[in-house]
Amino acid sequence: MSPELHDGVSPPGAKAAAAPHLKRVLGTWDLALLCVVAVANLNLVPVVAAGGAPVVWFWLLALVFFFWPQGVAVIEFSKRYPGEGGIYLWSKERFGPFHGFLAGWCYWTNNIFYIPTLLLYLVGIAVYIGGPQYVSLGDNKTFVFVAAILLLVALVVLNVRGLGLGKWVNNAGAIGTAVAAAALGGLAILVLARSGSTLSRSDFRLADTDWSVMNTFGVICFGLVGLELGSVMGDEIRDPGRTVPRGVFWGGIASGLLYVGATLAVLFALPAAKIGAVQGILQAVSSMSGSVGLGWLIPPVAFVLTISIAGIASAWLSGSARIPFVAGLDCYLPEQLGHLHPRFETPYVALITQSVLSGLFVAMSFLGATVEQGYKTLLDLAVVLQLVPFLYLYAAMIDLARRPDDGHGRYSKGMLWFAGLSGFITTLVGVVVAFIPQHEGEAPWLFETKMSLGTLLFLALAAFFYSSFSRRKTVPRAAAAGGEAGSAAELPGPGG
């Protein structure tokens, strides 16, 4: 892919530069497994399940009105704009460079927060592999920090070596997710057969649900993003016209089933008030396996869950790093971010930059906080930023639906209207309810202030970077011509 791909004009000084070339290594099942590992993040299940049985209805609503429209949007826009960049590229094509940059910026910066939550969760789960004597290490901030940083370095090295290697971590993560969810479901069925359910129909009633539980709907929408991640790596997919629809379909079906099944299994195993945000899955496994005499299952499940979370972290690290890579090519961020590794042909500068920033937020999350508090703080910061690009995604579908049919799309006008409107409204609801405080011991006004200021800060940073770097995309024509005097005209760069 080259800088000319999106705007039609090379950046100043890029006379004969070779176009960056990314290898096409992702097939249908690679993409389907990437969707599963990106979407079905079991680390979010305990946070959601802590809201009680009514959250199952939230899952179903989000699957119909947020997740399904997301699949329609990804397939439609991948056909129209198959290049590298995903939501960044699609928003840019529909609404212009600034909005494309803002969508890409929020998508990227959210992952700077989200990847650390995965690392903290992984370490908290991995300690169960060694048995009960090592579980307490999951609350040791020094151990968790060092282990998380070492894991981050390992994932960066694998992905710098190439997506052809890194995709196996992603694929293993998807398989680990399926195995862990199957273990949860199997244990739940055994417990139901022997002891019956502790849940009743009345537990699923929405009428008695506390208002603060609405916060989990934002987390659910956040948990259902990821179908678009493969398209962010559009230049690395083999035969995208056939691969994307198939991969999105099968990956989406599997992800929805895994989420609902895992949530029900955790709710069958534990009272909502006792579900821990970090170790809730293994708490459920421990409770159910102990009741049916299968306590030996805990370390193996911890192992496969560790593989699952490692794959999720790798997928989001490699996928989201493509946003600053493309923005660097477009000169909306430092151009060094658009450099490829001379040997492995990967966006190594963008990968390393993202990992350094994520490492800093791992450290910051522990300032005056426990591991669980640090995890929740980072997750709260990530939810709103992640949903902003999806407002753009669904708005782009609405924009597409209201224009004359150009014959280049896949879906009918009616489908685009319905998916676009339902997705936009649901996403907007998810953003709003994310500002509802759910954390015990924290004043509501303090939570809402932190969320508001944090969101505004990152939006302001996006405007600052765009303004600063877009001004550098113009140079005096005289200078471009070799220093000839007498002309004050400017030579536009990309998007100019």
Image: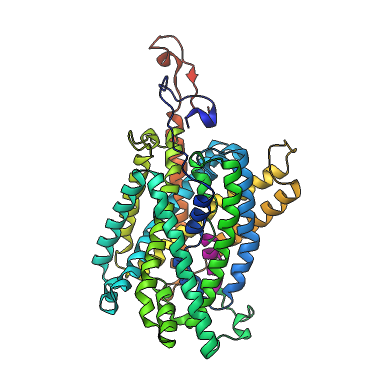
Q: How many marks?
A: 0
- Residue 203, relative to residue 79: is it above or below? below
Task: Judge by depth and name the residue closer to the eye, 107 or 210.
Answer: 107
Name the residue: 43% across, 54% down.
170
Coloring scheme used: rainbow
Looking at the image, residue 478 sits to the left or right of residue 213; the answer is left
In the rendered image of this protein, does residue 351 appear above or below residue 432? Answer: above
Magenta residues?
212-223
Going 32% across and 59% down the picture, which residue do you hit? Answer: 362
Query: In the depicted view, which residue is nearer to us: 310 or 449?
Result: 310
Residue 176 drawn above or below residue 348: below
On whether residue 213 falls in the magenta region, the answer is: yes
Residue 327: percent from left, percent from top: 45, 38
Whether 203 is among the magenta residues is no
Q: Position of residue 283 (x, y in %)?
A: 40, 78
Q: Residue 86, how many percent across, how many down?
A: 53, 44
